[in-house]
Amino acid sequence: MATVTNNSRYLSSHLDPARQSYPVMAKRNLGDTGLVVGEIGVGTAALGAGMAAVPDEEARYFLGLALDMQASLIDVAGTGGEDRPLSLLASAMRGRRHQAQICLRVAGGPEELRRNSEAALRALGTDHIDILLWDRPILSELTGRDSAWAVLAALKKEGKALCLGASLEKPAELRAATDRTPAEVLQFPLNIFDQANAQVLEAAAAKDLGLIAVRPLDSGWLTGRFSAGHIFLDARHRWSRADKARREGFQEAVEALVDKSGTTTTQAALQFVLSFPQVSCAVASVSDWHQVVGNVDAARGKLDPAVVERLKDFWALDIQPRPLVA
């Protein structure tokens, strides 16, 4: 157990006074990179443009709380070094950079990769990124012979990145990255509603790649907080009412499947992703300290293997034939 040391006015007003300490995160090796990461990572998408309802002090607090709990892998996008998540993370890490493992996603071609990586380094106030990921290149770029991977390799050689990889969406992209690129780490979506990428895990792990799963809660849907009538004001507005209605029905089915497992649906969703031994870390986006504590608590338990298999069968029979809109 670890005592919370992060200083903030939120410490006395938000944390449960009955709890004197909070759980220390279990760790897993990130492939053959030499990095050891917490099983749960923290996503910062909710702190970006259009999502500024989280006050700066609250955001700095829960990022610091995550570091206290050794949920040390912080996932952040780098788009020129000016984004709010970068500045908030820089503030939260001040004086404790050694406790954080920054997973930075940068998009674009060779020039953009270097420019955005170096801008993010300046914004974060650090001299290196722990995990530098090429963010969602198209397949022809991913395996092409241009200088994008050479730029990433040069950044690593210069000491600006400890390890390199790619953030991808589909099994075909993950297979190509596994077989035909110098990636050391792969990041990809994996959750109860979207298990397609599970088919690539064994092959990637056999090559000692570090594997980071994102969207383990299906962009928040598997928390049970939403219904078909919910209106999203962020990127999730892409979901039509029909998409949301399908998710609502599937959410109810998942709740029934995990009802007797002794966990909440949110805990079961995180534990499901962590049931894959090849996965090093599940990164869930958070917007308040309750979510940080809840996610860390979820990692303390293991989902009943029988429930895991039922959830796999549920996806194969009910969702895989007509996948949900991501």
Image (cartoon, rainbow, N blue to C red):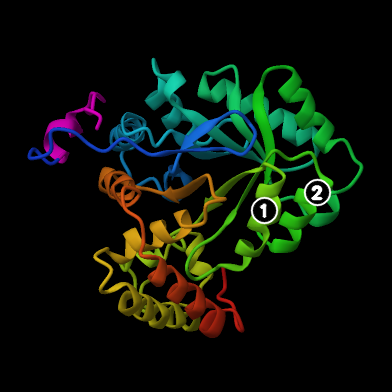
Quadrant where the N terminus sits is top left
Q: From what the image shows, is residue 184 above or below residue 203?
A: above
Q: Is residue 149 left or right of residue 100?
A: right
Identify the residue shown where x is 56% and y is 30%.
35
Task: Give the image quarter of residue 16.
Answer: top left
Q: Can I make out residue 240 in this image?
A: no
Looking at the picture, how far across and down is residue 252, in whole percent? 34, 80
Looking at the picture, how far across and down is residue 150, in whole percent? 84, 31
- The tag on residue 98 is none
Identify the residue shown where x is 55% and y is 75%.
324
Q: Is residue 140 left or right of residue 71?
A: right
Q: From what the image shows, is residue 300 above or below residue 37?
A: below
Q: Earlier in the sequence, mark 1 or mark 2?
A: 2
Q: Residues within 10 Å of mark 1 (few under 14, many from 20)?
A: many
Mark 2: secondary structure: helix
Q: Nearer the viewer, residue 170 or 260?
A: 260
Q: Which residues are magenta?
A: 1-15
Residue at the disc numbered 2: 142
Residue at the disc numbered 1: 168
Identify the residue shown where x is 57% and y is 50%.
278
Q: Is residue 12 magenta?
A: yes
Q: Are marks 1 and 2 in contact (CB under 8 Å)?
A: yes
Q: Can I make out residue 278 in this image?
A: yes
